[in-house]
Amino acid sequence: MPGSLNPTAMARLLGPWNTGAAPAYRELADVVRLLVMDGRIPLDVALPSERALAVMLGVSRTTVTAAYASLREQGFLSGGQGSRGRTGIPHRTVPVSGPGLAVPDGILDLAYASLPATGEVVHRAFADALIDLPALLPGFGYDAVGLPPLREAIADRYTAAGIPTTAAQILVTSGAQHALNIILKTLAGRQQKVLVEHPSYPNALDAIRASGSRTVPVPMPPAAEPTSGGGGEPTSGGWDIDGMVAAMRHQRPAMAYLVPDFHNPTGRIMSNLQRRRLVREAAGTGTVLVVDETLRELNLDDVSTSPLAAFSPAVVTIGSLSKSHWAGLRTGWIRADEDLISRFVQTRTTMDLGGPIVEQLAAVRLLRAFTEPLDARLAELRRNREALLGLLAEHLPEWHVERPRGGLTAWCRLPTPSSTALTVVAPDFGVRLAAGPRFGVGGAFEHFMRVPYTLAPTQLETAVLALRDAQARIDASPQLRRTLKAPKEAAAVA
């Protein structure tokens, strides 16, 4: 039977919650939210009645009533006023809008790292696709592999990058996440191990967990000192290749999921020297290297590297148009040898029977003129990145920010392990965030926050000022901070 929390135990958990940094009801609600998210107040537990808790805390019943009402509104408490509500976790703590746009109540969404469509270019591609559509209407419309012209266009891009590729080596998917799910179901499966960088892309970690596979995290080294200048070969040190090799030899993971090109969330790029060694060492372990290249084209510093597949035909590559053009296209792909592609196709048919045709026709047009919108997009991202880094240095100088070489996000080390607390209170200041532990396993990265630079500089200024104010509230209310450090955090990015 679900339990209940008596007023004495509740007061002990709350500690010195009322610091005067905000209205009392809001401070009370903030601390209760954090206790629920931390697990220190279990789920489906009845909280004390409003009257009993007010007496125990020495505050008015109105304060407790308002705090409970706020918790109910956000989904952390069930039941109506006057009843003993039970704790829960909402599916979303605030309304979600499209990436980069303000939600209806004015919240800036920094939980997503995505851009709006490349406007006219995407619109024109869909208009042209409708011209090509009638020729395909007599067919069934099911195609588990992908339209031949699209597979050829994708193969041509790899060939132009120095990796000879045929259409038979391409499987078109409904985005990169769909591609990863197909690969996991084919190569890993239940109870098998998957090596990942730590931190890593949250949706990939979710997919690995959902597949029943066991995650093998390999911490990334501390951030190197920032360097001036632009392009050229990146310095080594962004990845712990020794650690990855040791994990592959001793843990024998079925596959490794890696983001070597403008890594999400750190923005790092793996050097060719590290790529070559990683591929060489992996060859003797039986671990399949699966590389997510969805951010590779967002090369803000003109860094020169070769795709990982250039070093071995055994590498499996995931790509998509989501970051370069628009996530709404839902068009991605897998590049691998033909035998693996055949296995992926067999798996795919147990999940769906093919992708949408019009999107694929539009994707052909976009791939054939791939660079048309890219220069303007990169210039915009460079401006946004510099604006964000400058604003963080000015308004949050105690945050240590790793300068990203490309991609869409900056990885920030916080002065205290307060990432979850900051995520909880930030919506009160108009910002939605993804807490650092979303990018790790075992509760790691409470000292870290990912901040995208996908918004315009004026919006970034509003967001950073809101982060400053939210950080100030946490600094003034120590009880809002998460008190338990993640056990593996010390070994992660510093």
Image: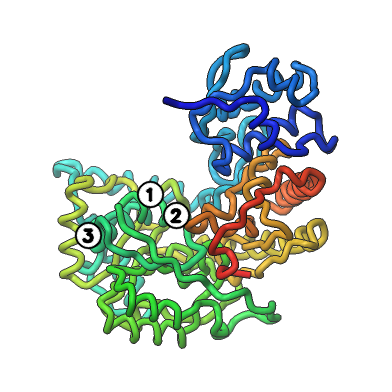
- Residue 472 at x, y percent in the picture: 80, 47
Q: Is residue 135 visible?
A: no
The mark that comes first in sequence, 2 or 3, is: 3
Residue 305 left/right relative to 47? left
User: Cα distance, mark 3 to mark 1?
Assistant: 21 Å
Residue labelled with disc 1: 330
- Residue 236 at x, y percent in the picture: 54, 84
SS under mark 1: loop
Residue labelled with disc 3: 186
The mark that comes first in sequence, 3 or 1, is: 3
SS under mark 2: loop
**Which part of the image, by quadrant, shows the C terminus?**
bottom right
* Residue 119 sits above or below residue 37 on the image: below
Compare residues 333 and 438 and report the one nearer the observer.
Answer: 438
Q: Is residue 60 visible?
A: yes
Crowd class of label 2 (few under 14; some 14 to 19; many from 20; radius 10 Å): many
Residue labelled with disc 2: 322
User: Cα distance, mark 1 to mark 2?
Assistant: 7 Å
- C-beta proximity under 8 Å, tags 1 and 2: yes
Compare residues 159 and 335 and report the one nearer the observer.
Answer: 335
- Residue 107 at x, y percent in the picture: 66, 37
Q: Amino acid at mark 1?
A: Arg
Residue shown at 65%/65% (left/top)? 382
SS under mark 3: helix
> Which mark, by number, is residue 468?
none
Compare residues 490 and 360 and report the one nearer the observer.
Answer: 490
* Residue 438 sits above or below residue 193 on the image: above
